[in-house]
Amino acid sequence: MREDGQILRGKVAVIGAGISEVGKVPGKSPLALAAQAASRALDDAGIAKTAVDGVLASTSFASPFHRFSVAFSEYFGIQPTFSNTLQVSGATAATLFHVGAAAIQAGLAQTVLLVGADSLLTGLTPDLALRSMSESRDQQYEMPFGIPVANTFAMTANRHMHEYGTTAEQLAQVAVTFREHARRTPGAQMRDPITVEDVLASPWVTTPYRKLDCSLISDGGAAFVLTSAERARALGIEQPIYLLGAGECYTHEHIFLMPSLTTTGATRSSALAYAMAGYGPRDMDVAGIYDCFTGTVVMMVEDLGFCAKGEGGPFVAEGNLTYGGAIPSNTHGGLLSFAHPGMPGALFHFHEVVSQLRGRCGERQVPGAKLGLVHTLGAGFATNATTVLGTEETL
Amino acid sequence: MNSLEQVMRKPLPVPDADTQAYWEGLRQGKLLLQHCLACGHVQFYQQAICRHCGSERLEHRAASGRGRVHSFSVVHRAPSPAFKGDTPYAVLLVELEEGPRMISSLIDGDPMKVTFDMPVVLVCEPVSEAISLPRFRPAEREQVK
Ligand SMILES: [Zn+2]
């Protein structure tokens, strides 16, 4: 059992962040998107690629390279002395930050580049597109019954509606709110306004989810530069953003072994992250919440402690996820409206929260944001990872 | 077989070292659960150790075949062309009488009439010489189309 986490709290800083072109980006491979994001992150940090001695990447479905972090380093022209490619589905984004920070604190690397990119919209060969349809769940116990990826999440939302009276209108409000946010985000994939009625009139995918309850399919990537808090100061970095808390929880692999369909491992991952940070949910000014489906967000606002269990539906419907509400979330538009290139999708949540804490979000800015939370998850809530970030004054 | 043919056919489970007995049981019309002789834990799916206590003393026993729908989702957009002809169909998360839950899909019933906690009964559906799939039908006859 881990200690209170003071070894890591505030010891590592994000000093650079960058995102590639996102949305529909034909003609750019995942490695090209990764390189573009990495160059932008290094430019943002004001350091040269030769300063990078560690590289961590998420896997990339459309790329033929299984060791994506290694292939990326060759492509980018660097030879790091610490590297790995991580894969815990949608939760990978936060784990990149956790592993990168731990490596720096342990002395395995000084400057770690985190990178993730994929091109699920335009980059899949016909062969890969077929594979993506047939290889997503367990081949003996799940796939024979025709389970789309959405189905596991759909069954959790359905049960939540049954147990707590959560309504389709409340789910729809999540999509409407994040679309409203995306309208102010340059480069967001979907920027046309939608209404609750539009969501409820969109075609069924798998009940209770309709098309507009589901996230996008996109191309794109993001990259971040991490270094020690000490070195960030020595480099004279303006506005380093500190990693204050980190927590993860892995409760099952198969959906039928999920301990409860309506209370997830996010309760534990976020409790660990809050404990390390020394802050609680009410202290957070802004959040990035993994929004693969609308109902996912309803369950997460409960498990992350923003409201009580069962109250997620009314909470999101009352405007608590937007400006002036309890916790402005996914101010870039999220996976539902900004972009969702698979594994890198939640890196955009990190990019947005870091930008908010640096006060660089322009008309999307949450005034005075100092503390932010990012929660990433995947595989029917099998994987959960929570990160708390803060400015200098929150240390 | 090329991948196009593969994706046009429904995925057929390939038994592994842990699951031979499970699939052989289904072929004979029995849904086998593992009972731990050390701690009494009953588990699905089939594996070499008890997930609760780690014991290898596991015994296969046939389930009653009765269960209830813990949750479900009716699929309207199929995950692959192979399932297109079946839509809308109900994927079920069944809670067996013995405790464990499993994924299945509704057979011989109206997918639009599936409800929470609805009683269901096992139907072993042969899909190849070696493989029968554990599916479930409504226990109440009036819910059958
Ligand atoms: Zn046991």
Image (cartoon, coloured by chain):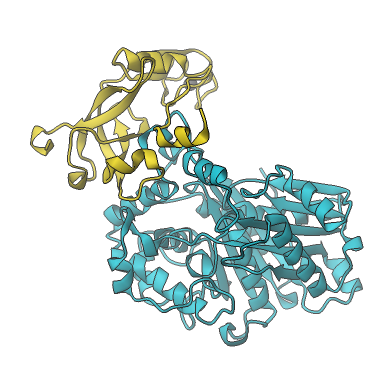
Chain colours: A cyan, B yellow
Q: Is residue B92 above or below residue A73?
A: above
| Corner quadrant of residue B39 | top left
Q: Is residue A296 above or below residue B52?
A: below
Determine whether, in the image, residue A335 is placed left or right of residue A10: left
At x 87% / y 70%, what residue is drawn? Answer: A47
| Corner quadrant of residue B123 | top left
Q: Position of residue A159 (x, y in %)?
A: 32, 50
At x 85% / y 70%, what residue is drawn? Answer: A232
Q: How many marks?
A: 0
* Whether residue A142 can be seen here: no
At x 60% / y 66%, what residue is drawn? Answer: A349
Q: Is residue A9 above or below residue B68?
A: below
Q: Name the residue at the left extreme.
A: B142
* Whether residue A309 can be seen here: yes
Q: Position of residue A77 (x, y in %)?
A: 87, 56
Between residues B25 and A63, which one lies in front from this camera angle? Answer: A63
Q: Position of residue A236 (x, y in %)?
A: 88, 77
Q: Position of residue B78 (x, y in %)?
A: 36, 46
Between residues B19 and A162, which one lies in front from this camera angle? Answer: B19
At x 48% / y 22%, what residue is drawn? Answer: B14
Between residues A222 and A285, which one lies in front from this camera angle? Answer: A222
| Corner quadrant of residue B12 | top left
Determine whether, in the image, residue A124 is placed left or right of residue B112: right
Pick the quarter of the image with the N terminus of chain A. top right
Pick the quarter of the image with the C terminus of chain A. bottom right
